[in-house]
Image (cartoon, rainbow, N blue to C red):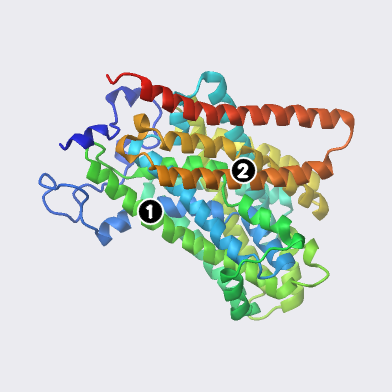
């Protein structure tokens, strides 16, 4: 074995009693597929379309977070209020999201462990418990939006016969679909998600064809950056909802569903190459779908009096009023796409919750029990939301703003540990990121945190009133900033300290 291969992280037998993302029997077999004698192979194996197909899957599950109901609401509001002017930002936000997700995949492939597991080992008990609580809160916030999105779609498709709370119960049952499909293997589960993504693509492409947005304005919106003071809030929303904290944890676990020989550097590099290709392809498709939604609402409502009042609850009805019935009413096309987005994202949320709980707490529970616990965390508050806000669109919009804030607060607690861990040679071996990529990644992280900080400042400056509430917010903000500084300083100081230690 070449000397540099000794630096590649190995999977030790000591971890057999710990919780793992996938048991060996659950993984997709890759080694030896479509290649010559493996023993004589040096370096990275040659490219193979068959292998690319076998590696395809985790990136598409990851991409669903870019298509959840929260993102769709951000798309339609950006289109209705800003027209085509923020399409360039949507494209670059997707590129930023791809960079973060590739780093997450790199961490999972190179170490054989996912982000939550590594956080458990890297941080002291108090810090990792804070990180776990923050990750769970982010997941709950995202899941409430996703379940409500599905419930809205079910209400539309049932012509109002099923209220929001009934839609929430139906959506809650998706964890049993997840468990059923998981019993038939990872590839069957990935195929199910592929069908849901295809459903979204067909639904929103149909809407695009019905409304006929301007191709010229679309192209100019993608290529020419434009930003005005009137659209700054929508711009922040476009960037802010691209990076979902639970999705960073999820992708680092999903990539372990393939059998990789971690003792050979070439095999690890091969996996990274294929995952990079399939993740880029998946996010390209998600970008096109988001583009469809944004341009449809830009064409239909930009410059109209109702533009600022459109949200998930009433978007379908507004489209129906403007474009009528047709062969298949656009209201139901919208609802089908929204249902596919909600169902797919809630199931991946259940998946992410399993990895987050198992990784941080090292719980070896039965899959059905862990899925049930994870589902309950989100369904109970969502049911309360559905019962309280069922008759008020304005109240749902306010709730959605609070949930966006909840998720924005959590972003540093996924992003900073990821960047610190993926930069450490003691963890990544030869696959640690280089100085150029490290600089770019930290600049992106600072940009995203700053943008979400602006969102938080704008929200709280409008919502916080009264001395007591203001004092609580200031105290929380102080603790919040202090913990961020702790995570950053620990990442840099521990790396510097380990470099000073003598080699064993």
In the depicted structure, whether residue 170 falls above or below residue 215: above
Q: Is residue 88 visible?
A: yes
Viewport quadrant of the C terminus: top left
Residue at 83% in and 70% down: 305
Q: Give the camera-side residue of 331 and 309.
A: 309
Q: Mark number for residue 276?
A: 1
Density class for disc 2 (Cα within 10 Å; few <14, some 14-19, many ≥20) is many
Count the marks.
2
Q: Which residue is mark 2?
A: 449
Q: Position of residue 251 (x, y in %)?
A: 45, 44
- Side (left or right) of 444 relative to 155: left
Q: Earlier in the sequence, mark 2 or mark 1?
A: 1
- Side (left or right) of 355 relative to 172: left
Density class for disc 1 (Cα within 10 Å; few <14, some 14-19, many ≥20) is many
- Side (left or right) of 392 relative to 186: right
Residue at 32% in and 58% down: 53
Q: Position of residue 110 (x, y in %)?
A: 34, 39
Q: Position of residue 488 (x, y in %)?
A: 54, 31
Q: Position of residue 46 (x, y in %)?
A: 21, 56
- Side (left or right) of 485 relative to 34: right
Disc 1 secondary structure class: helix
The quarter of the picture where residue 318 lies is: bottom right
Q: Nearer the viewer, mark 2 or mark 1?
A: 2
Residue at 22% in and 47% down: 31
In the depicted structure, whether residue 502 falls above or below residue 289: above
Q: Are marks 2 and 1 in contact (CB under 8 Å)?
A: no
Furthest residue toward right: 466
What's the distance in space between the residues labelled 2 and 1, CA to CA? 24 Å
Q: Is residue 371 visible?
A: no
């Amino acid at each position: 074995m070449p000397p540099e291969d000794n630096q590649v992280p190995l999977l030790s037998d000591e971890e057999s009693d710990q919780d793992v993302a996938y048991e060996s029997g659950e993984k997709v077999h890759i080694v030896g597929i479509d290649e010559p004698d493996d023993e004589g192979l040096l370096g990275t194996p040659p490219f193979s379309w068959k292998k690319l197909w076998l590696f395809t899957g985790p990136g598409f599950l990851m991409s669903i977070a870019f298509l959840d109901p929260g993102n769709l609401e951000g798309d339609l509001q950006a289109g209705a209020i800003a027209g085509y002017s923020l399409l360039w930002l949507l494209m670059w936000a997707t590129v930023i999201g791809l960079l973060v997700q590739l780093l997450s995949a790199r961490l999972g492939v190179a170490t054989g462990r996912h982000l939550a597991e590594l956080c458990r080992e890297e941080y002291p008990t108090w810090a990792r418990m804070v990180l776990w609580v923050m990750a769970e809160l982010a997941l709950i916030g995202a899941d409430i939006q996703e379940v409500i999105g599905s419930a809205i779609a079910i209400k539309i498709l049932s012509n109002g016969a099923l209220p929001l709370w009934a839609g929430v119960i139906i959506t809650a049952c998706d964890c049993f679909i997840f468990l059923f499909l998981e019993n038939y293997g990872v590839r069957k589960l990935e195929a199910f998600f592929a069908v849901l993504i295809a459903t979204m693509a067909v639904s929103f492409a149909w809407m695009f064809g019905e409304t006929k947005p301007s191709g010229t304005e679309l192209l100019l919106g993608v290529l020419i950056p434009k930003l005005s003071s009137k659209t700054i809030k929508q711009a922040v929303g476009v960037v802010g909802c691209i990076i979902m904290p639970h999705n960073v944890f999820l992708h680092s676990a999903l990539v372990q569903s393939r059998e990789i020989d971690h003792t050979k550097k070439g095999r690890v590099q091969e996996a990274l190459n294929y995952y990079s290709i399939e993740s880029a392809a998946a996010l390209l498709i998600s970008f096109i779908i988001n583009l469809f939604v944004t341009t449809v609402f830009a064409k239909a409502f930009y410059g109209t009096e109702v533009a600022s009042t459109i949200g998930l609850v009433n978007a379908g009805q507004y489209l129906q009023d403007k474009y009528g019935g047709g062969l298949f009413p656009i209201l139901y096309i919208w609802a089908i796409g929204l249902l596919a987005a909600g169902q797919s994202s809630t199931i991946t949320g259940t998946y992410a919750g399993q990895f987050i709980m198992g990784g941080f707490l090292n719980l070896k529970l039965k899959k059905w029990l862990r899925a049930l616990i994870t589902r309950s965390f989100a369904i109970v508050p969502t049911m309360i939301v559905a019962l309280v806000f069922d008759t008020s669109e304005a109240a749902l919009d306010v709730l959605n703003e609070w949930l966006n804030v909840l998720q924005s607060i959590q972003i540093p607690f996924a992003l900073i540990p990821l960047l610190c861990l993926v930069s450490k040679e003691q963890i990544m071996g030869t696959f640690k990121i280089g100085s150029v990529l490290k600089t770019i990644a930290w600049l992106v992280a600072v940009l995203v945190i700053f943008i979400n900080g602006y969102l938080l400042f704008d929200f709280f400056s409008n919502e916080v009133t009264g001395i007591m509430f203001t004092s609580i917010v200031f105290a929380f903000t102080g603790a919040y900033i202090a913990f961020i500084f702790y995570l950053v300083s620990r990442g840099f100081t521990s790396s510097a300290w380990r470099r000073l230690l003598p080699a064993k």
